[in-house]
Image (spheres, rainbow, N blue to C red):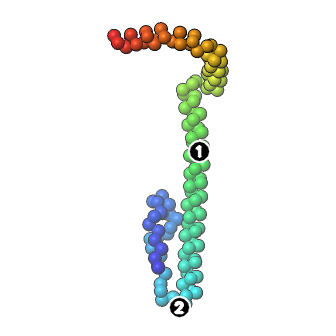
Amino acid sequence: MLLRRAHIPQEEVFLVGIEDVVVIDDSVATAADRARLQHELLQKELDLLRARLEIVRSQVGVVAKSGVTWVNASARSQLGSYPWAKFAALAASSFLVTTAVRKLSFGSITAAAIPLVTAAMKKSMR
């Protein structure tokens, strides 16, 4: 029986060992000995998978922390030194505009929009 370990990524090779293939010899005396050897190999494989899972968990933690740092730096570069204040002002202004538009009747909105639309169409035809 062969247990192949070629599916392990290059950065995790240090977890495997030197050999690439583990062979369970059929000349082992009894079926119980073969079962014991196979159990040991599977236990080692399980330990390897647990170690790989820990590597993935640590990488996820690093990615999450770097993502938060990147978002904070991106917001500061786009919005300046007080991004939270600018965001709050944007949210408040959009709330006020939405409230004002809801209070207007639909007829007055279209009456105001028609000249703007026709001016835009005339400008694009020139």
Q: Quadrant of the C terminus?
A: top left
In this view, 72 is above or below 89:
below
N-terminal label among 2 and 1: 2
Q: Position of residue 120 (x, y in %)?
A: 42, 12
Residue drawn at 58 percent across, 28 percent down: 76
Secondary structure type for disc 1: helix
Residue drawn at 56 percent across, 73 percent down: 42
Kindly identify which residue carries mark 2.
29
In this view, 91 is above or below 1:
above
Residue 19 in view in this figure: no
- Label 1 crowd (10 A; few <14 / some 14-19 / many >=20): few
Question: Would residue 6 appear left or right of 55 to someone viewing this image?
Answer: left
Q: Which mark is residue 64?
A: 1
In this view, 63 is above or below 36:
above
Q: Position of residue 9 (x, y in %)?
A: 46, 60
Q: What is the three-letter code of the residue carrying label 2? A: Ala
Question: Would residue 55 appear left or right of 2 to someone viewing this image?
Answer: right
Residue 22 in view in this figure: yes
Q: What is the three-letter code of the residue carrying label 1? A: Ala
In this view, 80 is above or below 15:
above
Residue drawn at 45 percent across, 64 percent down: 7
Q: Position of residue 113 (x, y in %)?
A: 51, 12
Toward the bottom, the furthest residue is: 29
